[in-house]
Amino acid sequence: MTDPLLKIRGLKIGATIYPPGEKAREIEIVHGVDFDLAPGKVLGLIGESGAGKSTIGLASMAYGRGGVEITDGTVEVNGRDILKAPFRDVRRLRGGEVTYVSQSAAASFNPAKQIMEQVTEAAIFQNKFTKAQAEARAVDLFRKLGLPEPETIGNRYPHQVSGGQLQRCMTALALCPEPDLVVFDEPTTALDVTTQIDVLAAIKEAIRDTGVAALYITHDLAVVAQVSDHIMVLQQGAMVEYGTTDQIINDPQEDYTRALVSVRSIRHEEKQPTNTPVLRVENITARYSGLSFDVLKNINVELHPGQTLAVVGESGSGKSTLARVITGLLPPSAGRITFDGRTLTPDLATRPVEDLRELQMIYQMADTAMNPRQTVGTIIGRPLEFYFGLRGAEKQKRIQELLDEIELGDGFIDRYPAELSGGQKQRVCIARALAAKPKLIICDEVTSALDPLVADGILKLLLDLQKIEDVAYLFITHDLATVRAIADSIAVMYQGSVVRYGPKSQVLAPPFDDYTDLLLSSVPEMKLGWLEEVLRHRKMESAGH
Amino acid sequence: MGRRAGRLARQRYSADPPSFPKARRMRVPLAALIGLFFTSLFFLSAIFAPLIAPYGMAEVVGDVWEPPSDRFLLGTDSIGRDLLSRMIYGGQTTIFIATAATALSFVIGSVLGFFAAVSGGWIDQTLSRFVDLIMSIPTLIFALVVLSVMPTTIPILIVLMGLLDSTRVYRLARAVAVDITVMDYVEAARLRGEKIGWIIFRETLPNALSPLVAEMGLRFIFAVLFVSTLSFLGLGVQPPQADWGGIVKENKEGINYGIAAALYPAYAIAVLCISINLVADWVLNRTTSLKGGRG
């Protein structure tokens, strides 16, 4: 057997935390992790946020980020313990033997320098190649990664290429110095599904062609199943399960792994449309001031009481703009919105309070949707006070009822948002919307910032509340798995237009239009070989045309 | 490597908004302690001036420019008044005017700044350009022109300084509030149908407080310097009322004869300014994301 390239034994990582109002204290965030990685193999590290995936990934470069400290264990790269090595040697290692691809390429590239300069920088600095060699190698990598105009794309600046292209440039950057190991830290998480599939395919091919070993960090099991040989499941800094990709996906041993594999277990029966929709959007066209094109083009959709309309599309397709138009934040340039039989005025300022009350909104980032200086009691209590004039004991009682409804219970009333977890924050935002007793809640990507299991809990809660309160949801999302789970009808948006609209069963059944087909087939499935299957299918189709 | 990053993280997390009210247990650095000591010394002596001053403010008790002695700890001034008593009463006047002017400038500046940021559009443009206009005229010249036509009483001094300084506060308050008003929770309040008063005082103000409180210390220093300058030029506090700038002016001839009387108020101004600066720096470092607080 060959010696492992990366050998980690008893790795313990600590951090100092500063909880509000308490003394700073040391905590352990990774509790003794062991694994080996053979040359040319890919290991997927998977887990929810806070599981320690990225921390372990960075530890393989002997790096601890933001207050994080490697407290115990050994990390051997090519047989050398890099934790005990002098800093000079660690410098040779980083960007030479081990390289790193981060989640946000846009935030990682220097906007003031050309891509080529940044891609070749490490290779030249490490004296692996001369400038000319490195540039030739970069062009070669650009070609392998399927970037357009590989000879000249390096002369562009980071803002002159798209997000998916920039992520591929970063992969080229990591591969340019001919490393032995690349750490991929959620490289496709920030991308749209239709872009993700291309980047994923490019990364997989580049790994295969260059024979480099990789640590692939992600929270999406379906993604990691496409690229890795082995998978390690992590939870709260400890290993839950380790096995081949086949075994983890098809025969998980631990309960936690099973929960991850079977996530989105929600089944939702599609409801029949009624005669009187609660919301009717007719011929809506809108643009932002200063833009020369319409962001929304002639949108027509309907939403029935107690049902869910999912609005699906990539970023930039106009989903959130539609929400802004309905709420009155962006008056449309043409069209009409009817809500509960009344025509809504285009501008928020002229709407009667009753219209505002019956139309509530929940945001993607619960963090910024709550005032950090207000307690949960104030946040939920304000709509009660504002719309219903509740005061004192009556208000407290209603707040507690709402907290019970969102399954938070006692002891949360006096907490500040910073003292809540991500899922709890989103629940409080749901309670704030429910407090107004609305007929319609606009949910703008409410689960996309959450871990899969937490998101599942939120979706279940939303469906339960829909049954109790008979509220309609306009559910904006880019995640088709979520749509399948909760929608009654679906509107697929592309570049400001609705390209497909109807009941869920119809929209998700063939024959598809080109865009819906692309969108649906791009959602990673939890099975091995899915990526190859899709790519083969697409190649055949394009050959057939 | 990790240890260094740990220290960085400490600064970052101590800035978390909700930790502010509870985080008093933190160790106060020496510089801030020195600042706190002198600041409270000056303020206490200003508040209790009549109790601690050995003589009356305008009482002539000795010869001209007597040297320091047991009777007159700092000697006497240009017309034989006890300099220590003048200094204590002068501190009272200077600190009172500066405090009142700072408070006024913060009320006007922050309310208008928040109002502009929350309203946006033409209201914001009109207010901001008007403030730019005022700021384009040098403050001292502006004040000299106004005071040469208005009677120089203490209320007029306070109002004038408060108005001039409020332009600086407006700028800061608006800049901070613009960052806050784009947050989803402010949008949520708008969608709820909240009036502008709630958005300013309940959503914006609590989140803008820390940088404003820190700025208050710095603005107070400028107010002390400004009122002292005006008095030195003869357009500020009028004799026989004592104030530090005025004491410098009254005794400046003494310097020619090697008499240090004019230097004491100058020292007092310097020490007060530095100590308040030390306190403000400490508050600023601990509570705000501005000025590099959050790495």
Image: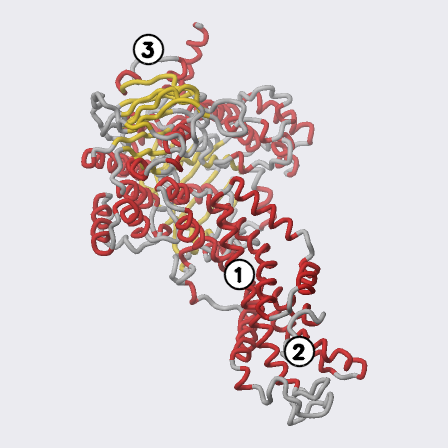
Residue B231 screen position, x and y as percent? 67, 71
Viewer-proximal residue among B278 and A275:
A275
Disc 2 residue type? Pro
Residue A135 screen position, x and y as percent? 65, 27
Please state which of the two labelled residues, at mark 3 or mark 2, is closer to the viewer.
Answer: 2
Disc 3 residue type? Pro
Is residue A200 something that shows in the picture? no
Please state which of the two labelled residues, at mark 3 or mark 1, is closer to the viewer.
Answer: 1
Q: Which coloring applies here?
A: secondary structure
Residue drawn where x is 48% and y is 43% of the image: B119
CA distance for labels 3 and 2: 94 Å
Is label 2 in contact with label 1 (beta carbons under 8 Å)? no
Residue A273 screen position, x and y as percent? 22, 21
Which element is circle 1 on?
Answer: helix
Return the chain for callout 3. A
Residue drawn where x is 59% and y is 33% of the image: A177
- Residue A487 position by quadrant: top left
Return the residue at label 2: B239
Return the residue at label 1: B214
Is residue B150 something that shows in the picture? yes
Return the chain for callout 1. B
Return the residue at label 3: A511
